[in-house]
Amino acid sequence: MNLWQYILRRLFYIIPTILGVALIIFIIFNVVAPDPALIMLGKHATLSQIADLRNELGLNKPMWAQYLDIVKSAFTFDFGRSWTTKQEIIQMIKNGAIPSLTLTLPAFVLSTIIAVSISLVVSFFRGQWIDKCAVFFCVLLMSITSLAYILFGQWFFAYKLGWFEISGYESGFPDFVPYVVLPIIIWIILSIGPDVRFYRTVMLDEIYQDYVRTAKAKGLSERVILFKHVLKNAMIPIITFVVIQIPFLILGALLLESFFSIPGLGGITLNGVYNSDFPVIKAMTILTAMAYIIFSVITDVLYTIVDPRVRLK
Amino acid sequence: MKKFTTLFTAIALLIGFASCTKKNVETGKTLNIAVSAEVKGMDPIYANDRYSSNEVGRVYEGLLEYHYLKRPYTLVPNLAESMPVVSEDGLTYTFNIRQGVLFHDDSAFPNGKGRELVAEDFVYSIKRLADPKLQGLGWWLLDGKIKGLNEWREKYSDLPSVDYDEVVEGLKATSKYTVEFKLTKPFPQFLYSLAMPFTFATPREVVEKYGKEFLNHPVGTGPFILPTFKQTKKIVYTKNPNFRKKLYPTEASDEFKAAGFLKDAGKELPLVDKVVVNVIIESQPRWLNFLKGKVDFIGIPKDNFDSAVTPDRNLSPEYEKKGISLLINPSLDVTYTAFNHDLKLFQNADLRRAMSLAYDVVKSNELFYNNTSLPAQSVVPPGIAGNIPGYVSPYRGPNIEEAKKLLAKAGYPEGKGLPEITYDCPSGTVSRQIGDYMKQQLAQIGVRIKVVTNPWPELQKKITKRQVMLYGIAWGADYPDAENFLQLLYGPNKAPGANGSGYNNPEFNKLFKTASVMQDSPERTALYEKMNRIAAEQAPWIYGVHRQNFTLRHSFLKNYMSTDFETGQAQYLNIDSELKAKSIEKL
């Protein structure tokens, strides 16, 4: 099977997956959840208004028609309008995507590079004090809650020292840069602990393989072994770990965006949840599910590139 | 190692770049406001929460407004030239509107120049609020009040499109500058609805041009302009260059006179050139931005309360030195725990009174409101006619001994024979804690409570369907009239109306009916007070508190006071730019 056939076949799997996701969303929001008309009308709702609104929202349609609406929206990207803001959801997503990505993308790329680099160094010095210290610091970093980093970072570096903006956002490069630096640093600190521990384990697994011993026996230097052989072989778990995280980048960084007032998708999602704004939650769920499927296809394709032993089936 | 060096250099450069970038403290005549919730769109008919109605009120205006410097709250003409002529039967209200008022420029108008406001704009805007297809959130205000409007609404609810040109008997422009409202029955509170954003003037051609996107293209007659609204964290308004000659008031209540609020008297509004609204949801960044002078005023976040306010309710010296001042004002609201009066159990007044007496409101004020609220004695909050200053309800707790006696009198000595009572409240940590506190308080007299938390709509549904026994909730004023609170206990308003507890007392109902058609007068106030007393003595609810606002402002912000009706406030506020430049140095 060639690569394109494989990709097409995998993309075809999106259809049943979306049907399933749509079914779950439908059951959660259209069957189990409380009546949205009551949420929207607030404290002065009357029965006739509730009935009118249900009609307007299409909640009086037969169940199958409501389910089909969800499925349709996944393929047309027409998610309708938000119930609370009355804005077009696709427009909200477009507006929020760039601010989110200006935060999550550099943060993600930097934290991955830093974590992989540190892991290589500590694997090189495995069992020595550098390795022990690194593991100790990773555990230390992980044992502090993310909120503490945010609150302290904002208070100390932005307010007390005045190095960064406390919160806010300006669109357009380079205006946004001063606003995202502190959240990016916090993101990196937050992810370094778990990432380094994961990559270190992956690399150590490789280091104890037979081929490493063979390479050593042949007299190759540690550095060549590490960078040329170990890193390449460790790429499969690394790619899986990295690519699978990407779909969640589009969801934005919920807490960071909220604390730093970055008008990204995290805020949209969070607000959707706070206000029981079902169309927004549905849209974000569908988008994440689709991104997840697409990126898992990409992961599989990447496997074949980094490891010729992996065959497309 | 070279790679690491490059990487760290890049990070260092990024940080350096961030630090060197301009510090965004605006020193011109710019008002910097922080709000703690997302702003929905800018369509007046959907402005049902504080945040959206404040934003709508910067761009749009109505016939009336609250006098900025008078307390008690007093209505004065805004787009109306004068207060309306009211017919003797109290049914017809005739308004002459100001001439020469222009809408903001927009491409929907010929040549893009804003046209003059006419009486027909109010007819159109109010029909929009009644439009069944639009589901305007302020319809309750006018529901059943204007002759022919309900019929117009109903007629079009099943038809595919709505005809705005069809004449409604009670809503007419009788000349270019005269609008006439005919009511179905006397309703003195009608005028308040004309000061609420729901009824503000929107130009038809703009609405029709933008359709569903109208909410992102605000075009009003107001003091500030916002060409396009984007759902973002920062909204920037500029001064309307064509704003009519509206002046800062020259009269004020004594308290405002004494506080120097008349320094800008007679000046043309608005006093600032720009308004920047920052949406900062989390309290810490909101607070830190205020302390840095990037936000001009702030409601004190709960977690910062103890650091900012001393136990004797003064501002802590640390902040005083920075030129910050503290403003305390009661808000027009009441929190309460309602009994479901449909249940025979709670038709027993002694049981209700006993439960009310067992509840320690002073302690709850301490626990949940930093001791900043006022214990409620009855339903009407201080600051509006109908509240009786100094009145103490005979059934205001804590008085455990008396509560036990009353419980025995009610037929349940030490709670024997009483079923377990469910207490429903909205989900959320504080609501749940308040529920647990209620449980603990009532356990002292032997009443067993089970706390049930519900998502907000679920709680509303339960109340409407009468599936509750006891529930905790709050009510904030829509307008400064005791009627807005007393209606919560008026029998015919029973759920799904506003009377969720289903309290039904013929004497109270009779008084309410009489007062509801009376214009503001000492006689009406006497009736309100009588009802307020009944509401205390009959204990239809266990009263909670009237909350108070604790606000801080910087010295460079002038004319600011904390108010329950903030719509339009920005036009009166002023910034002392020189003082601001100096103060920022110190912050």
Image (cartoon, grey):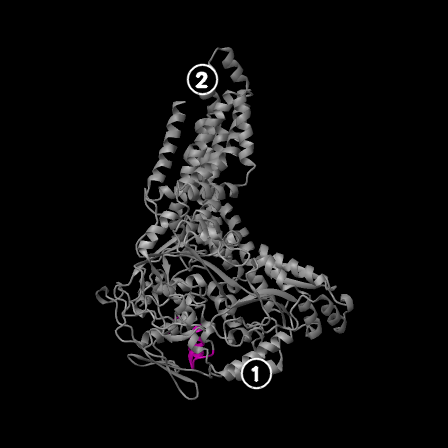
Q: Report helix, strand or loop for mark 2.
A: helix
Mark carried by residue A224:
2
- State whether residue B538 is above or below residue A172: below
The residue carrying mark 1 is B511
Mark 1 vs mark 2, foreground winner is 1
The percent coordinates of residue B427 (x first, y second) are 58, 57
Give the image quarter of residue B342.
Answer: bottom right
- State whether residue B76 is above or below residue B327: below
The percent coordinates of residue A189 (x first, y second) are 48, 36
Q: Is residue A296 visible?
A: no
In the rendered image, the quadrant that contains the N terminus of chain B is: top left
Give the image quarter of residue B336.
Answer: bottom right
The percent coordinates of residue B437 (x first, y second) are 65, 59
At x 70% / y 70%, what residue is drawn? B354
The percent coordinates of residue B538 (x first, y second) are 65, 76
Q: Which residues are magenta?
A: B144-162
